[in-house]
Amino acid sequence: DNGGYEHYLLKEISEQPDTVARTLRGRIDDRFHIAHLGGLNMDAREIRSFRRVKIIGCGSAYYSGQMGAQLIEELARIPADAEPASEFRYRSPVVEPDTLYVAISQSGETYDTLVAVQELKRKGGRVLGIVNTVGSAIARETDGGIYLHAGPEVSVASTKAFTSTAVAFALLALHLGRVRDLSPADGRRICEGLRRLPEQIKEILTLEDRIRELAKKYADSPGMMFVGRVRGYPVAREGAQKLKEISYVHAEAYPASELKHGPLALISPELPTVAIVPDDELLDKNLTTLGEIRARHGRILMVGHRTSEAADDCIVVPKNEVELDPILLTIPLQLFAYHAAVALGRDVDRPRNLAKSVTVE
Ligand code: BG6
């Protein structure tokens, strides 16, 4: 039942204040500023033994993993990175005992991710799952994990599972961090930030009319560039993925810092840029990048925490803690892709050539 919404996708985007709250429910410890994650099946001694975190998943799950890697590095100071599950599996990976492996899957049935998990287990790897569907294949194969509790996701393009996965990673990063060196003050700051997310998502959803207008304005471009730096880069990648999947507008995501090393050659009035520009320590660098795009007559839609003269249009979202801002910055891009797809008359919930979960090789 699509709850009176025209598409499941819009319903699922709109549910996010609630789904994020469900991912958080009962998991924040306000006394010790740590996360309760009973499903991890890991004690403090084991958590301290990990030297590295490797995250795998496919599609949007992979991009949420990139966001997760960033959170773990920042909060727990453990080197972490994400890789597409199928790439990981086919390159015959070296499996190390002091690496924590994390597999992400909304459905819990994606074949490439499942086989990668099985390969890890065979080689003695310690694997956690971040999964939405309770009792699914990946949930059963992993040693422990975090359920999203986001409810069934129907539309092919992932939205609420993406944000809940990022929230689950924030909880995991907080947990790993507090067992290691993250200070109680920083732990408290993150706990308080997490609690603010549902209300702030509601605020972002009120921007829908304006985002619809912007989507109409940009949807007839032959392609769009998405750029972000560090925390903003996974946001850019997921934003480009959403646009491609449901509107079929070509979209490329680049680290903003890489623009001048190649893709700047593409910038012209026909290729607008969506720039993710959070108010963080990289703000000035990002604004400089906008100037470089402007100088090549590129149009710019900036998504961030303030407006800027350097951009043609701006979407301003509420500010949280710098580590958690990427979660919020993702939401206007979901709405942007949705309304671009509607404006172009696409089959929003069932985009051509795609399946909700790919259970074959
Ligand atoms: C793709 C879907 O095929 O699978 C994506 O089209 C999804 O939307 C990806 O992100 C991974 O799915 P899952 O269920 O493993 O998270």
Image: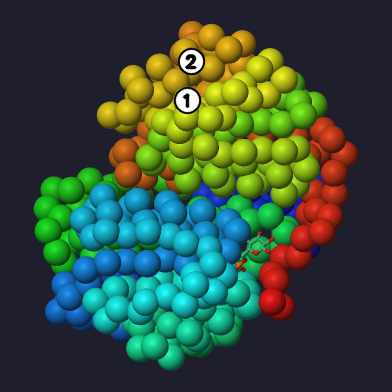
Read off the residue under disc 1.
260
As displayed, is residue 86 above or below residue 123?
above
Q: Amino acid at mark 1?
A: Lys
**Which residue: 23% across, 65% down?**
176
- The location of residue 23, given as percent across then percent down, is 45, 62
As displayed, is residue 278 above or below residue 113?
above
Residue 313, quarter of picture: top right
Q: Amino acid at mark 2?
A: Glu
Query: In the image, 68: left or right of 239?
Result: left
Of residues 247 and 193, the one nearer the viewer is 247
**Which residue: 71% across, 78% down?**
360
Q: Of helix, strand and loop, which one carries label 1?
A: helix
Q: Residues within 10 Å of mark 1 (few under 14, many from 20)?
A: few
As displayed, is residue 222 above or below residue 29?
above
**Which residue: 32% across, 38% down?**
322
* Among numbered discs 1 and 2, the one appearing first in the sequence: 1
- The location of residue 317, given as percent across then percent down, is 47, 30
Q: Of helix, strand and loop, which one carries label 2?
A: helix
Outermost right residue: 345
Q: Residues within 10 Å of mark 2 (few under 14, many from 20)?
A: some
- The quadrant of the rendered image in which ligand 1 is seen is bottom right
- The location of residue 203, given as percent across then percent down, is 51, 35
* The disc label shown at residue 292, or none: 2
Of residues 323 and 269, the one nearer the viewer is 269
